[in-house]
Image (cartoon, rainbow, N blue to C red):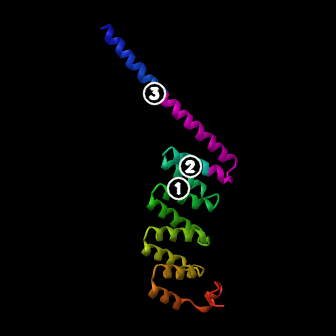
Amino acid sequence: MVNQIYHSRFADDIAIISVWAKSKVRTREACFRKELEDLIRRGRWNKSVWVKYAKWEESQKDFARSRSVWERAVEVDYSLWLKYADFEMKNKFVNHTRNVWDRATQLLPRVDQLWYKYIHMEEVLGNVAAARQIFARWMRDQRGWLSYIKFELRSRGLERFLSALSTVTPRSVLGFGLLV
């Protein structure tokens, strides 16, 4: 009977130590999170703090928290959309990456770099049809035409290239240096 009580107390002690050790780890993580949140509150426009925080959450394999940080960060500077999409792609979340690019191009349609990166990703993935759809959205703005024509030449879409070229007016192409 005494032996059973001893073993029971020993098991309880181990359980308590295990809970204590886990709480210490959680406390350390919580303290670091709090420090980063405080830094963000003090210097909201400091992009490096946002990036550090999102990457730290990623290193903890807490992708949901990392996404949450990125979602808040993209309001600060458009260049953080690029890093956010890189985070998603690096972790092989292709559909999340598409979602990020789609929202970025909708919110910031005049930032050509976002369009280039989005199209490049689809091209690298071999999704030519999706790249064409993205170009169709971008070409509502005339600046996308030249890039589209070059894309069709790269992807051997000669008929599509000629069709696109015939729809471009000389006036709209002059700004791109095609007709000089």
- Residue 108 lies, in percent from the top left, at 60, 68
What residue do we see at 56% from left, 65% from top?
Answer: 104
Task: State which mark lies toward you, 3 or 2.
Answer: 2
Q: What residue is disc 3 on?
A: 19
Q: Element under label 2? A: helix
Q: Identify which amino acid the numbered label 1 is placed on.
A: Phe
Work out whether residue 17 or residue 160 is closer to the camera in this orientation and state it.
160
The magenta segment is 21-50
What residue do we see at 46% from left, 79% from top?
Answer: 155
For the residues bearing labels 1 and 3, Cβ distance under 8 angstroms? no
- Residue 87 lies, in percent from the top left, at 52, 56
**Real-space Cα distance between discs 3 and 2?**
27 Å
Q: Identify which amino acid the numbered label 2 is placed on.
A: Lys
Instruction: Tell me the crowding category of disc 2: few under 14, some 14 to 19, or many 20 or more residues within 10 angstroms, Cα based.
Output: many
- Residue 146 lies, in percent from the top left, at 57, 82
Q: What residue is disc 1 on?
A: 87
For the residues bearing labels 1 and 2, Cβ distance under 8 angstroms? yes
